[in-house]
Image: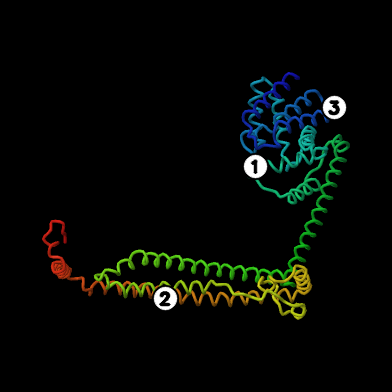
Amino acid sequence: MTDIIKKTEEFVFNLFKEELPNTFLYHNFTHTKRVLKSTNEIIQNSDISTEDATILQLAALLHDTGYTKIRDGHEEESVRIATTFLQQQGVDQTIADAVNQCIMATKFKDTPQNELAKIIRDADASHFGKSYFNEASEFLRKELELQNVRTYSPSEWLKENIEVLSQKHQFYTDYALKNWQVQKEDNLADLIQSNKKEKKRRQKEKMKAQLKAKAKDASPERAIQSFYRTALRNHIKLSDIADTKANILLSVNAIIISLMLSTLFAKFDNPANQFLIVPTIILMLSSITSMILSIVATRPNITSGEFTKEDVENQKVNLTFFGNFHKMKLEDFEWAINELLKDKDYVYSSLTKDLYFLGKVLDRKYRILRVTYTVFMTGMIISVIAFAVSFKFSPTANIDEVLKSEEKAMLILQPEVYHSHDYFV
């Protein structure tokens, strides 16, 4: 009989190695070996026959082979695999039937009906009474998660284990009750203690969240700070946008004026180009006006940069703006800041003033920029129209008459040159 045990162990090892998915972190060959070891413990401390011992050992080795095919109903699949294997090995049918009965007895929800069923059932659940219970339990939880059976949180799995150990499981054999029950109770006590700690931790976190929410509702400090931060940031961005728009106008008008100086003004010496003077002047005036307004919009104001101690004590100076303190000594400024930080209302008052005056500056900038863009747009439109009208009604439209008049003038002034071969019209 020892030979069939070795062959069965080798068969199960190869079967698991080749066909068992690696997601079975608990129901694998390690678990099978542990069940076989626990079975042998009970056999050695029980008065059973050699044949019954062999049946139990074979059942311990073959009871989870069905997991290679299916999870739900694996016991029935294990019976089919065991039947085929034992027939191939020439095992007596009576022993094979007994092995199959023991395999079916490992169903957790069924109550074992005979001594062999009780032994195999206790051996299969022996990890409840072992020191490695927590390790095996965690492997089982991860296995269920990897195979999409169910995902347990640590607290949920803790409750599940307490329920199983305290209500759903029991040992049936005398050996298990004497030797494993004590460790099982210790494991259960550890689970209960961990559950209590988990409850305290959750209650503490819940209370902390409630207090935090209550404090947040009671004190609008964060909302106030967020308001000032957001408002000041938006004002600064708007100021940057205004400066960018003014710089664009300055650059464009500078280019226009440069082109006019280099091209149009050089042609005014010729009487034939006199019609360009008026539209050029219009374009020049609109560009210069736009540049002046752009400069005015971005020109900084000069402030005194000084304050007195009375101003700080009376909360009349806004220390958030550099123009109010840039001429002060460092020690005076540090004293003023310390006085500011002592009074929360003074801080908020300074931020409010800073926000207000930023708004006033923005109002001035955008009003001037609106006028500037209007002047620039109007000047461009009028200039284009003036150029078109000048080209349409200019005296140079009849170019033949101009050429003839010039030719006559040259003939009167220098008749000898007119008859020369060097003269070209």
Quadrant location of the N terminus? top right
Q: Identity of the amino acid at label 1?
A: Leu
Image spot of residue 225 (x, y percent):
69, 69
Q: Are marks 3 and 2 in contact (CB under 8 Å)?
A: no
Badge 2 marks a residue whose secondary structure is: helix
- Above or below, 15 against 143 in this view is above
Residue 146: image tag: 1
Choose the circle earlier in sequence order: 3 or 1. 3
- Which callout, 3 or 1, points to the residue nearer the camera? 1
Choose the circle earlier in sequence order: 1 or 2. 1
Q: Which residue is mark 3?
A: 44
Image spot of residue 35 (x, y percent):
76, 32
Q: Are marks 1 and 2 in contact (CB under 8 Å)?
A: no
Q: CA distance from mark 3 to mark 2?
A: 108 Å
Q: Which residue is mark 2?
A: 375
Give whichever of 68, 249 is nearer the camera.
Answer: 249
For the residue carrying disc 2, how many other residues have a C-alpha within 10 Å: few (<14), some (14-19), or many (20+)?
some
Image spot of residue 325 (x, y percent):
70, 72
